[in-house]
Image (cartoon, coloured by chain):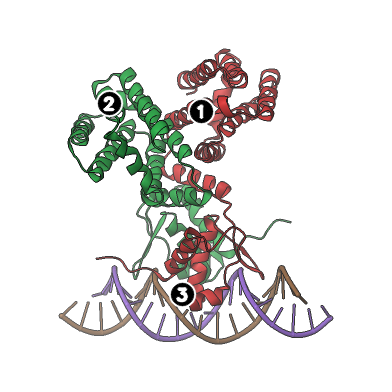
Chain colours: A red, B green, C brown, D purple
Amino acid sequence: MERAEKSYEKTVDHIKKELLNGHLRTGDRLPSERELAEVLGSSRNSVREGLRVLENLGVVTSCHGSGNFISLNFDETMSELLSFMYFLKGIREDQVTAFRRSMEWEAMYLAVERITDQEKAEMMGHLEKLEAVQTEDARVQHDKAIHEILIAASHNDFLITNYKALNNLMDRYIRSMRARIISGMNSHNMLAKAHRELVEGVVGGDLEKGLHGVLEHFRYIEEYGK
Amino acid sequence: MERAEKSYEKTVDHIKKELLNGHLRTGDRLPSERELAEVLGSSRNSVREGLRVLENLGVVTSCHGSGNFISLNFDETMSELLSFMYFLKGIREDQVTAFRRSMEWEAMYLAVERITDQEKAEMMGHLEKLEAVQTEDARVQHDKAIHEILIAASHNDFLITNYKALNNLMDRYIRSMRARIISGMNSHNMLAKAHRELVEGVVGGDLEKGLHGVLEHFRYIEEYGK
DNA sequence: AGAAATTTGTTCGTATGTATA
DNA sequence: TTATACATACGAACAAATTTC
């Protein structure tokens, strides 16, 4: 027995369809809620429930007094949703590390070919600061920036979005993880060395070196980041 | 100027908090909508908008006449949402391929150590059928199964969830992609060879062989799958 | 088995704040 | 400033499904 479609789903499906077939695009204004209700044969409240779902997905933005608009700005909502779901599923840090490694490994391949001069400069800047600064907070910040630029330089949307979600997850729910990792930079110079290899590899177009840096970086985390 | 919190967000935030602090768990029943409205100081309609959002995320299930329950079954909803968002962001097939490769490469490392006997048997079964069957549909099916088992055998939730989303995306929005790839198995035996290497590698505990299979598999896609 | 109570599904009406011309 | 269109929010009502007694 197929479950009957709820009324609010008519709105969600309708807007989705209009997006898929290209009738609606970013910035477009939707018909008013009353109008949608009439067209879809449901009440205004049901339409509103559907619009709230789409708003929460980052597909629609509601402006009080003005109307509902297609926004398509899921980059933030997506990483928030992903990280929240991952949290509820139960996070295991070794799984986070493995997923990160898979993305950075691939990103290294892509970034070596695609990285821009500006990205190179920023990356080198953060590397030098990472090695110079003394506070743990500052180290965390520059460490994070280096890895983000590596991913960004891959210019692959899947990697970028998922890495953002992972960052969101770590910042929000397992904040200690990053600090625990970076705190080892004092006692072991293995992590510092890995970062330098990683950066010099991608900046200098030396794939082997870059990959080795990534590998060493995560080998360190798995050994000492517990 | 900070935008004021909308009324329905009170419900979403409230339930989220109750999940984070452990007061609510899978299967628990929420207070009735009227009760929630009273507690949160909002109307039943606003509460319902919030519940619809959570339902769409796979966090809550509403049962007519019975109540609202915590479900936490996002595995399906998540891959649907992800694939929809990816679609709206605009899909580039080379990016899909790169993301797949990054996950399968990592999965090979993990699966070689963790794959179960049952997974081994299933994988071998699909490989033999992949090489035996003649119709393109059947080939697509067994090809898909092999890669799914590889990912599942990694026992990494991040890889599993994201791979499901990618599958959803390919099935729904770029159906031709998979067929285009697999259709080359007739003219080139490179793809068939890659599959055999991949499977024999992970089943036989030969990491090098498995990785080489993955590499060749995606090298084929990038060269001929256009 | 059946009636009553509870709960969600859905709709309508109304008041209010906001944006736009 | 005024008028109109619109979203925001609340309350009430009834239908439909479920649970309880």
Which chain contains the residue that carries disc 2?
Answer: B
Q: Position of residue A12 (x, y in %)?
A: 46, 64
Q: For the residues marked 3 and 2, what is the alpha-carbon distance in whole angstroms?
A: 53 Å
Q: Are marks 3 and 1 on the same chain?
A: yes
Q: Which residue is mark 3?
A: A40
Relative depth, front residue between A75 and A95: A75
Relative depth, front residue between A181 and B192: B192
Binning the other alpha carbons within 10 Å of mark 2 as few (below 14), some (14 to 19) or many (20 upward) gives some
- Up the image or down, B96 lies above or below B5; here it is above
The residue sitting at 54% across, 38% down in the picture is A160
Q: For the residues marked 1 and 2, what is the alpha-carbon distance in whole angstroms?
A: 28 Å
Determine the secondary structure under disc 1: helix
In the image, which disc is placed on residue A104? 1
Indicate left or right for B99 with B1 as reference: left
Looking at the picture, which amino acid does disc 1 mark? Answer: Glu
Q: Is residue B36 visible?
A: no
Which chain contains the residue that carries disc 3?
Answer: A
Q: Which residue is mark 2?
A: B193
Looking at the picture, which amino acid does disc 2 mark? Answer: Lys
Q: What quarter of the picture does the C terminus of chain B occupy?
A: top left
